[in-house]
Image (cartoon, rainbow, N blue to C red):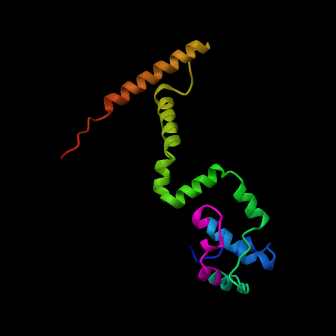
Amino acid sequence: MSKFPPRPWTLSGQHPANRLGFAMLLIFFRDHGRFPRRLAEIDPATVHMIAQQIAVARPACDTLNLSARTVERHRAEEPTQRDQHIQSIAERGRLGWRRQAEYGKRSKAETAMARYKRILGGQLRTRTLPGQQAEAAIGVAVLNRMIDQARPNSVRAA
């Protein structure tokens, strides 16, 4: 777990009795993408180091309050899509997450639309919906044929 405390402004609104526990929850969530389930998941040496850095007295018996209402509410909730992505990044690393989440899909779609508009124009010329659908289908077929003509035939060298 990282040994750097959260920014001071995130702890400024906390009651001094809750400041250390809140800081440890933020650090654990930042590093693991979830809140700790048990106290054993938090390293006592890290607790003491963070206590010194945020100028809070060390806990007497190495216990933190992990049963606060906010933590329990977050544990009970279904993880959001953002939480799932944070957890995936913590498990797989950023590149593994990008592959798993197909991160570049939107960029590829935007590139394809930009190519369509640049080559065929940004507006449809027909007025009726069936005519517009046919015009778009023909445009896509033309673009696909152009891409196939320009794509090299690659062969893996042994």
Q: Residue at x 32, y 34 (%)?
A: 151
Tell me which corner region of the image, top left, top right, bottom left or bottom right, holds residue 36. bottom right
Q: For this rendering, which residue is in front, 108 or 139?
A: 108
Q: Residue at x 77, y 67 (%)?
A: 68
Q: How many marks?
A: 0
Left or right of 7, for residue 112: left
Tell me which corner region of the image, top left, top right, bottom left or bottom right, holds residue 74. bottom right
Percent x, y of residue 72:
74, 61
Q: Is residue 15 above or below residue 86?
A: below
Q: Residue at x 65, y 69 (%)?
A: 38
Left or right of 29, for residue 114: left
The quarter of the image holding the N terminus is bottom right
Q: Is residue 90 above or below residue 51?
A: above
Percent x, y of residue 139:
47, 22
Q: Is residue 29 above or below residue 83?
A: below
Q: Is residue 21 visible?
A: yes
Q: Residue at x 70, y 84 (%)?
A: 61
Magenta-drawn segment = 30-48
Would residue 61 be counted in the magenta stretch?
A: no
Left or right of 153, for residue 99: right
Percent x, y of residue 67:
75, 68
Percent x, y of residue 52:
67, 86
